[in-house]
Image (cartoon, coloured by chain):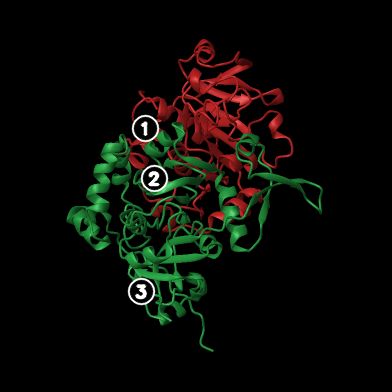
Chain colours: A red, B green
Amino acid sequence: MNYSPSELMTINAARLLRDGDVVFVGVGLPNLACNLARRTHAPNLTLVYEAGVIGAQPARLPLSIGDPTLVSGAAAVCSMYEIFAFYLQRGLIDVGFLGGAQIDRFANVNATVIGPYSKPKVRLPGSGGSAEIAAWAKRTYFITPHQKRRFPEKCDFVTGAGGGVLRAALRGGGPHAVVTDIGILEPGAGGELILTALHPGRTVEDALANTGWALKVSEQVRTTEPPAANELWFLREELDPQGIYLKGAA
Amino acid sequence: MTKLTPLSEAIAQHVHDGDLVYAAGFTHLIPFAAAHEIIRQGKRDLILARATPDILYEQMVAAGCARKLIFSYSGNPGVGSLRILRAEMEAGRLEYEEYSHFAMITRLTAGAANLSFLPMRPTGSFDLARANPQYRTLTCPYTGETLVTVPALNPDVAIIHAQRADADGNTHIWGILGEQKEAAFASRRVIITAEEIVDEAVIRSDPNRTLIPAMVVTAVCHVPYAAHPSYTQGYYDRDNALYLDWDKISSSPDTVKAWLAEWVYGVKDRNDYWAKLGVETRARLAVRPRWSEPVNYGEF
């Protein structure tokens, strides 16, 4: 069966969600992953959006994180201060998704700047909710195409703390998995990301060649289940019929 | 006392060159009509604060209104970069001060409560604190824990769009609530634009929905469709097509100038703008009703 890298990553991210999880949903592929999980193995997922919406049941795919479809039919709406203070800082969020231009060896994430802060080479949008999601969600996940420039040994700027020394004294559980189009990285001893799974047809060499540090490989690398027909059907027919997020190689 | 004012007068009277402006609204209810009026009136040297500058502040920066930006996420939501702001920041032409969303909203909350700062739990993201000395730490006097603090933000003027308000300024908002309430209480002056001006009795029929009370409101302006291309819950949809198009429009300063010439300088006011959008766009943004169940407050 044919599928795009975006479809492969989205489906594997959806499988990481557990029924009953309270998920802080981001736009784009994380949003697709959460809505896919809710239609397949995790019908009791609670979708929380940083705009202040709890228990959203979006009838259409929202382009932005503050789309009106998130509000109509939701369980609750609150202010931004409350969503960050009462929900995230309070410890009510099980899962957060993070994205960024760089993820490093310890799963620190950079969504702020490439190059020095005071003389940016590329100015990125900045933290938004990333700093707090990285710190306070019980589990954080990443969906990112596997490319050397996205996986440097060390981020130019740490927008969200990963699993290394920065983790001390934070309430959340930190990074749990990085889903790429080659496989899955998970934190090992000391919070360092190691390769734990490969997608069908991909090799350890693919992963090593596309990572910016000497990536450690688990002794038992598993192979992920290929995308199932029903997973692809929900994604293509129900969630993103126009292919806004799924078309192309991400 | 009625505070009803035409938008052009409210902007002329209450937004001054050099002011710190907070145009509130997280994706929802972004006050575009007021921003366009500020651009038309040629206000200068403004400090523009917003969690998400959005294409609103990009347009104001492109029009030369701003000397500094205070923000926490400078992207086009769901689309990508805000290209003009990015280019200005990369070239070192625009001064900016940066936070996370939570820190930005915490600043407003402190300002609203007349506190000088508020604490937050540490996030381990030390680079932002190194980049912005406004982030400080203190030792909690009760537990001994280290907490992060940010100073109060007290804008000179907040601009807030809403579904409905009475002439006094009692304001009903529903849908995504963002930081409108905090911005209103934190600011020295508050300009409300509203889809509808309603009788005080309508407000009093549902007091739980009054997010902003008259006592903090300076001016009330009746401006239907003031949020486009953002949206007003229950009134009209977000114009995602324009947000997607903006990615192309903002690819060069010239195309932005041409857009501003046509859609800001080239129209008299919001009525003119809404008419110019055309029948098809207006039909595309229309929303079907979905009413809430009425609540019973009881007669006493």
Q: Is residue A217 left or right of residue A5?
A: right
From the image, tell me which residue sits under label 1.
Answer: A246
Q: Is residue B227 above or below residue B256?
A: below
Quarter the N terminus of chain B occupies: bottom left
**Labels 2 & 1 near each other (Cβ < 8 A):** no
How many numbered marks have been drawn onto this rendered protein structure?
Answer: 3
| Quarter where residue B111 is shown | bottom right
Q: Mark 3, mark 1: which one is toward the viewer?
A: 3
Determine the image quadrant of residue B159.
bottom left
The residues bearing labels 3 and 2 have C-alpha atoms spaced at a distance of 31 Å
B1 above or below B180? below
Q: Chain of mark 3?
A: B
Q: Which residue is mark 3?
A: B197
**Residue positioned 53% across, 38% down in the render:** A97
User: For mark 2, does the 10 Å Cα neighbourhood hold few (<14), some (14 to 19), or many (20 or more) residues?
Assistant: many
* Element class at badge 3: strand
- Category of crowding for the residue at label 3, using alpha-carbon neighbours closer than 10 angstroms: few (below 14), some (14–19), many (at least 20): many
Specify the amino acid type for callout 1: Leu
| Residue on which disc 2 sits | B61
Q: Amino acid at mark 3?
A: Ile
Report the residue that reaches farthest toward the bottom. Answer: B300
Determine the residue located farthest toward the top in the rendered image: A205
